[in-house]
Image (tube, rainbow, N blue to C red):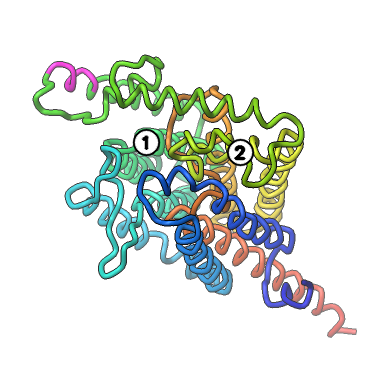
């Protein structure tokens, strides 16, 4: 394996963790898709092959991105932000609707879809990192420092929130964490939070006062998920999913039911994605579920270590944002499956059935490895200079 890793630059532990999880996902996806076969037809192998294609695309994207000079990543952050706005607007008006939410763009000539918010999340994190560096001397000034940083956050989250509240909320909170890391004064962060809560309240009042406008088309779904009331057939299904997820975790015991032998996965329509952790615990058990948590924590630790050692502020901010985002996605999936959080659509990075989320997670790791590779080259150059003088 060492012979192959020499072609992969950057942090070896991150490479090993990422590649092992992507390889392991082939096993679990094949095991977790029986319900998808029942609902949409096809065979488990056809879904495995589709996921394999996404894994290959994700690896290729990760490999080429990690060879890109970090300065180009920084320069492209603004372009990526505007491209994300364009994609979200296109999705808003022409997106493909699935389960009552229009979040996807259909790729022409192939039967594949792409969730524009997955690209928008990474684009926003990179652009915020760039702005935090550019405005670092003006973060005490609302007009010149805070407003230029908040505008992209409000725009991206505002375009996402209509059809994907959980993603918009998670992205906004992650953005606030990045502003805190970027040393935005705490009182200003508090003021921003109060202003956003007030704005959300105003939008909610408008929706309730003028229901004919249908400003928040998924308001009833959000409300029932939070209050856990089965007010409709749709939410009866969601509550059944949540209960089955907890039962699947209970059935896992210490050592699990065995690969392919889980039963509750056949009653979880999103066993391969939103309820991945429940299906994983049922088949692999409590011990391996703890190991999975530790693997994600090790991944976050390595990313934080690289970020803190990096002298470039943009690279440090971007690395921390990406690391926290990946762990947040995994954590939300686990908390939903255990019943701590209401049902929402966040899957397990690198493990859930592939698509735009897998590809963008791979691109994110590629960016981290690009930073790590550049950092290693600088370190090698610094070490070589004294030897050359001797």
The residue drawn where x is 29% and y is 23% is: 233
Query: Which secondary structure is most common in the magenta stretch?
Result: helix
Range of magenta residues:
204-209
For the C terminus, give its image quadrant: bottom right
Which of the labelled discs sits on residue 262, or is there none? 2
State left or right for residue 47 relative to residue 367: left
Q: Position of residue 101 (x, y in %)?
A: 27, 40
Q: Position of residue 32 (x, y in %)?
A: 54, 46
Location of mark 1 (residue): 142
Q: Secondary structure at mark 2?
A: loop
Q: Residue 82: name its quadrant.
A: bottom left
Mark 2: give few (<14), some (14-19) or many (20+) Cα within 10 Å.
Answer: many
Q: Position of residue 39 (x, y in %)?
A: 37, 44
Q: Secondary structure at mark 1?
A: helix
The residue drawn where x is 36% and y is 40% is: 150
Q: Is residue 88 above or below residue 211?
A: below
For the N terminus, give its image quadrant: bottom right
Q: Residue 155: name its quadrant.
A: top left
């Amino acid at each position: 394996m060492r012979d192959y890793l020499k072609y992969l630059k950057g942090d070896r532990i991150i490479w090993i963790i990422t590649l092992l999880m992507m390889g392991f996902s082939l096993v679990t996806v094949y095991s977790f898709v029986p319900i998808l076969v029942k609902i949409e037809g096809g065979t488990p192998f056809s879904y495995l092959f589709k996921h394999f294609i996404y894994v290959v695309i994700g690896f290729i994207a990760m490999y080429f991105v990690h060879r890109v000079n970090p300065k180009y990543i920084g320069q492209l952050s603004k372009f990526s932000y505007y491209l994300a706005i364009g994609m979200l607007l296109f999705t808003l008006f022409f997106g493909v609707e699935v389960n009552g939410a229009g979040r996807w763009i259909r790729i022409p000539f192939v039967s594949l879809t792409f969730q524009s918010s997955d690209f928008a999340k990474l684009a926003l994190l990179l652009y915020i990192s760039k702005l935090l560096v550019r405005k670092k001397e003006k973060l005490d000034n609302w007009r010149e420092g805070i407003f230029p940083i908040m505008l992209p956050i409000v725009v991206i989250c505002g375009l996402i929130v209509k059809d994907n509240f959980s993603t918009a909320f998670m992205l906004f909170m992650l953005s606030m964490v990045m502003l805190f890391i970027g040393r935005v004064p705490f009182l200003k962060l508090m003021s921003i939070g109060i202003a956003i809560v007030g704005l959300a309240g105003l939008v909610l009042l408008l929706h309730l006062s003028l229901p004919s406008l249908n400003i928040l088309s998924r308001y009833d779904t959000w409300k029932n998920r939070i209050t856990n009331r089965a007010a409709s057939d749709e939410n009866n299904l969601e509550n059944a999913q949540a209960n089955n997820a907890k039962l699947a975790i209970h059935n896992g015991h210490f050592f699990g039911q065995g690969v392919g032998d889980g039963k509750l996965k056949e009653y979880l329509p999103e066993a391969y994605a939103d309820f991945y952790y429940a299906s994983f615990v049922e088949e692999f058990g409590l011990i391996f579920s703890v190991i999975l948590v530790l693997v994600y924590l090790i991944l976050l630790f390595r990313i934080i270590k690289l970020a803190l050692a990096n002298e470039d502020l943009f690279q440090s901010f971007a690395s921390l944002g990406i690391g926290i985002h990946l762990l947040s996605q995994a954590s939300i999936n686990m908390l939903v499956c255990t019943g701590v959080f209401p049902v929402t659509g966040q899957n397990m990075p690198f493990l859930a059935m592939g698509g735009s989320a897998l590809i963008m997670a791979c691109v994110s790791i590629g960016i981290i490895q690009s930073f790590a590779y550049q950092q290693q080259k600088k370190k090698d150059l610094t070490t070589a200079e004294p030897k050359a003088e001797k």
